[in-house]
Image (cartoon, grey):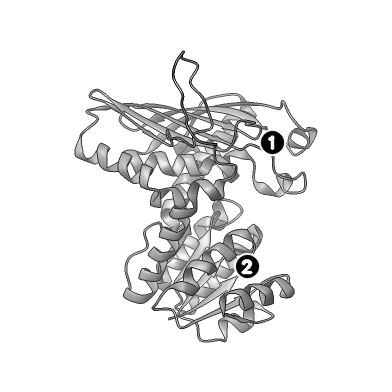
C-alpha cells in the first residue's frame, strides 16, 4: 500500500510512525502547511515529502490520512471519497451539522469508506466495558458517568475556532457512551461556568461543565468536563447496572487519589496528556484503517457515527446557552 498524509503535526506524525512500520505499506507520502516539518517527518520515517495536497493526491496513494486544520477536513474528505480513496480523518468531520451532513451524503453516494478518529473505541478499557454490557455481565443498565478533564487549558487562539467544549472535547465522551452502551442519547441538560482564563468566556465557551444525559432506555448519565484538572489528564467512564459496575481508566495512572486511611492508590504517576493515556488506542485505530485500505474492511467509525455524537454536542451547547433541557431530536436536520 501507499498511504498519503495531509498534516503531520502531533497526531499526524504519531499516525505516520505507525503506518511507516506496517509491513504492507510500501510508501508514505506526506504534506503539511509547514513544508519544513513535512521534510523532517519524511526523513525520520523514510517517507517522501511533497509540497502540496495536490501532489499527495497525484502520487497514486491507496489511502489518505487527514490531520490538518479543522476547517479543511470536509473538503479533503470529499476530495478523497470522490477519487475512490479510503480516508481516515481526525474529528470533527466538519465545522457544523450542515457541513457534516453534506459529507455524509457525498461519502454514501461515492461508496468510499471513511473512518473518523474516535480513538476511545480502540482503547482496551472501553472495549472491555462494551463487552461486559453486551454479555449482560452488568445486568440491566442503570447509570453511566464519564469524565474528561485536561490538566492545562488549550491556547487562547484555539478556543474561538474550537467549536466549544462540547464539540471539541466532550464529543469523545458522547461517542464513547453511545458505543459502550449501545444506546442513543435522547435528552441533554448542560450547565457550565468560567473559573479560569477570560478567553473562554470571551469566546462564548466555558472551562468547567456538567452534562446530564438520558438514554433511550431510561438510563441516566453524567459527563463532567474541565480544562483545569491540576492532578493530571483524567479520562474515565463508569457503566453501572443491576449486577455490577465497570470502570474504565481506574488504574495506577488515574489522576485522583484515595482519601481512605491506609489505601495507597494509585501507585504510579498520572498521565500528563492525552497521548500517554491513549497511545495504544491511536496505534490500534490507524492499523484498523490500514485494514480498511488493504482488505476493504468496513469502516469501524464512519461519518454517520460521528454525526450522532455531534448531534449530542449541539444539543449540549444549546442547552447551556439557553438554560434548558434539550431533546436531541430538536437539533437533528
Using residue 309 as the reference point, say whether residue 219 is left or right of it.
left
Residue 98, placed above or below residue 241: below
How crowded pointer 2 is (Cα within 10 Å; few <14, some 14-19, many 20+) is rated as many
Using residue 229 as the reference point, say whether residue 268 is left or right of it.
left
State the separation of the CA atoms marked 2 and 1.
Answer: 27 Å
* Residue extending furthest toward the top: 261
Q: Position of residue 252 (x, y in %)?
A: 45, 35
Disc number for residue 16? none
Q: Position of residue 42 (x, y in %)?
A: 62, 77
Q: Quadrant of residue 128?
A: top left
How crowded pointer 1 is (Cα within 10 Å; few <14, some 14-19, many 20+) is rated as many
Sequence-first tag of 2 and 1:
2
Residue 23 vs residue 102, the one in the foreground: 23
Q: Position of residue 135 (x, y in %)?
A: 20, 39
Q: Position of residue 277 (x, y in %)?
A: 50, 46
Looking at the rendered structure, the secondary structure element under dot 2 is: loop
At 78% from the left and 36% from the top, the residue drawn is 202
Residue 281 vs residue 326, the one in the foreground: 281
Amino acid at each position: 500500500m501507499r498511504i498519503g498524509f495531509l498534516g503531520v503535526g502531533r497526531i499526524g506524525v504519531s499516525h505516520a510512525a505507525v503506518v511507516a512500520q506496517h509491513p504492507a505499506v510500501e510508501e508514505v507520502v506526506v504534506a503539511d502547511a509547514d513544508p519544513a516539518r513535512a521534510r523532517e517527518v519524511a526523513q525520520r520515517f523514510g517517507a517522501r515529502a511533497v509540497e502540496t495536497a495536490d501532489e499527495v493526491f497525484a502520487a497514486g496513494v491507496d489511502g489518505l490520512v487527514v490531520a490538518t486544520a479543522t476547517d479543511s477536513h470536509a473538503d479533503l474528505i470529499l476530495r478523497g471519497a470522490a477519487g475512490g480513496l479510503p480516508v481516515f480523518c481526525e474529528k470533527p468531520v466538519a465545522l457544523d451539522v450542515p457541513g457534516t451532513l453534506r459529507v455524509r451524503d457525498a461519502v454514501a453516494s461515492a461508496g468510499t469508506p471513511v473512518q473518523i478518529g474516535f480513538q476511545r473505541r480502540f482503547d482496551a478499557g472501553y472495549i472491555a466495558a462494551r463487552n461486559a454490557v453486551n454479555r449482560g455481565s452488568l445486568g440491566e443498565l442503570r447509570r453511566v458517568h464519564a469524565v474528561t478533564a485536561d490538566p492545562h487549558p488549550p491556547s487562547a487562539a484555539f478556543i474561538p475556532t474550537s467549536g466549544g467544549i462540547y464539540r471539541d472535547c466532550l464529543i469523545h465522551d458522547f461517542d464513547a457512551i453511545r458505543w459502550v452502551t449501545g444506546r442513543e442519547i435522547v435528552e441533554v441538560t448542560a450547565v457550565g461556568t468560567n473559573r479560569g482564563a477570560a478567553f473562554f468566556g470571551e469566546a462564548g465557551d466555558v472551562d468547567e461543565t456538567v452534562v446530564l444525559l438520558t438514554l433511550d432506555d431510561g438510563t441516566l448519565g453524567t459527563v463532567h468536563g474541565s480544562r483545569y484538572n491540576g492532578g493530571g489528564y483524567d479520562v474515565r467512564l463508569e457503566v453501572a447496572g443491576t449486577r455490577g459496575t465497570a470502570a474504565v481508566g481506574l488504574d495506577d495512572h488515574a489522576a485522583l487519589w484515595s482519601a481512605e486511611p491506609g489505601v495507597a492508590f494509585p501507585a504510579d504517576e498520572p498521565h500528563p496528556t492525552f497521548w500517554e493515556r491513549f497511545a495504544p488506542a491511536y496505534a490500534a485505530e490507524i492499523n484498523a484503517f490500514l485494514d480498511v485500505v488493504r482488505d476493504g474492511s468496513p469502516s469501524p467509525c464512519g461519518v454517520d457515527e460521528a454525526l450522532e455524537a455531534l448531534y449530542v454536542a449541539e444539543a449540549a451547547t444549546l442547552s447551556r446557552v439557553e438554560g434548558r433541557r434539550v431533546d436531541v431530536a430538536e437539533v437533528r436536520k
